[in-house]
Image (tube, helix red, strand yellow):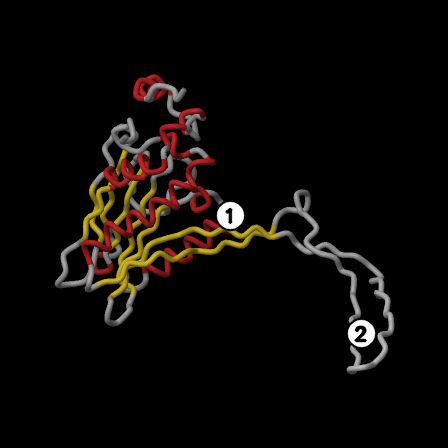
Amino acid sequence: MPSPFPGMNPYLEQDDVWHDFHERFLPAAAEVIGSQVQPDYIVKIDEHVYVHELPPEPRRLLGRADLGVTPTRSVGETPVAVGLLDAPARVRLPALDVEHEAFIEVRDRRSRELVCVIEVLSPSNKRPGPDREQYLAKRRQILSSPAHLVEIDLLRGGMAMPTEDRPSSTYSVMVSRADDRPEAGFWSINLRDRLPVIPIPLRPPHADARLDLQILLHRIYDAAGYQFYIYEGTPSPGLASEDVSWARQLLPPPTP
């Protein structure tokens, strides 16, 4: 069953749904792209790793600071009991939260050089803080390299990526070709618009690969069985008042 919305499904943006959608989207997109670019290119899924030190209140004790002494003995020696030495103090280690976010990279099969990076933005990329700063640093690195960048934003919430002369839109896709910088292609997408077919740039003499975002969304929606549970929640952030009744008319009947 395809998604009932003509474009992006706002119910996929809920906190308990988005991560699953994001993690399904990347391998499905890599498969579509790979079928078009093989054998000249390799399509791989890599990941960013974000390490967060949790604030003091929710921290949990990660280990004990007691020091144990293990006796050593020769063969045949009578064992001698040795007690534990109590540490003079106990400390708490910072509790860490590790988050992994996948992205796609296209590499030249022969040289292994990076040709194109495809990013699907997550909420952490669009919120102020260290995750966004880390992503923006990587983004700047790619934009100053010979690699192309495709940046897909299917989230209504948060801060948009820094882009000059950016048209107003609900969602967006940016395709930055290395030989066109500082200019880039930009797709403005609103809630009621069909998601576009976008190019995945390669290197001459190879033509761009194509990625139909709408067909891909329908495929993931059906495979994941989203129709059975995502409509029990509400879009996050909430829809504009003029879109609430429109969206309700599209929802499938409740699952018994």
Nearest to the observer: residue 57 or residue 98: 98
Nearest to the observer: residue 203 or residue 17: 17
Q: Residues within 10 Å of mark 1 (few under 14, many from 20)?
A: few
Tell me the residue that label 1 is attached to: 129
Residue for point 86% across, 66% down = 83
Q: Quadrant of the N terminus?
A: top left
Q: Position of residue 93 (x, y in %)?
A: 69, 56
Residue 73's place in the image compared with 166, above or below, is below
Residue for point 43% across, 36% down = 17
Seen as rendered, the residue at the extreme front is 76
Q: Left or right: 4 with respect to 235? A: left
Q: Left or right: 75 with respect to 109? A: right
Q: Left or right: 86 with respect to 103? A: right
Q: Residues within 10 Å of mark 2 (few under 14, many from 20)?
A: few
Q: Position of residue 18 (x, y in %)?
A: 42, 38
Residue for point 33% across, 31% down = 9
Q: Left or right: 229 with respect to 185? A: right
- Label 2 secondary element: loop
Residue type (three-letter) at the residue carrying disc 2: Pro
The disc, 2 or 1, on the residue closer to the chain's N-terminal end is: 2
Where residue 71 is drawn, which disc sits there? 2
Q: What count of labels does the image hold?
A: 2
State the CA–CA distance, disc 2 to disc 1. Answer: 49 Å
- Label 1 secondary element: loop
Residue type (three-letter) at the residue carrying disc 1: Gly
- Are dots 2 and 1 in contact, CB under 8 Å? no
Q: Quadrant of residue 158?
A: top left
Q: Position of residue 104 (x, y in %)?
A: 33, 54
Q: Position of residue 154 (x, y in %)?
A: 34, 39
Residue 249's place in the image compared with 74, above or below, is above
Looking at the image, is mark 2 or mark 1 nearer the viewer?
A: 2
Where residue 213 is drawn, which disc sits there? none
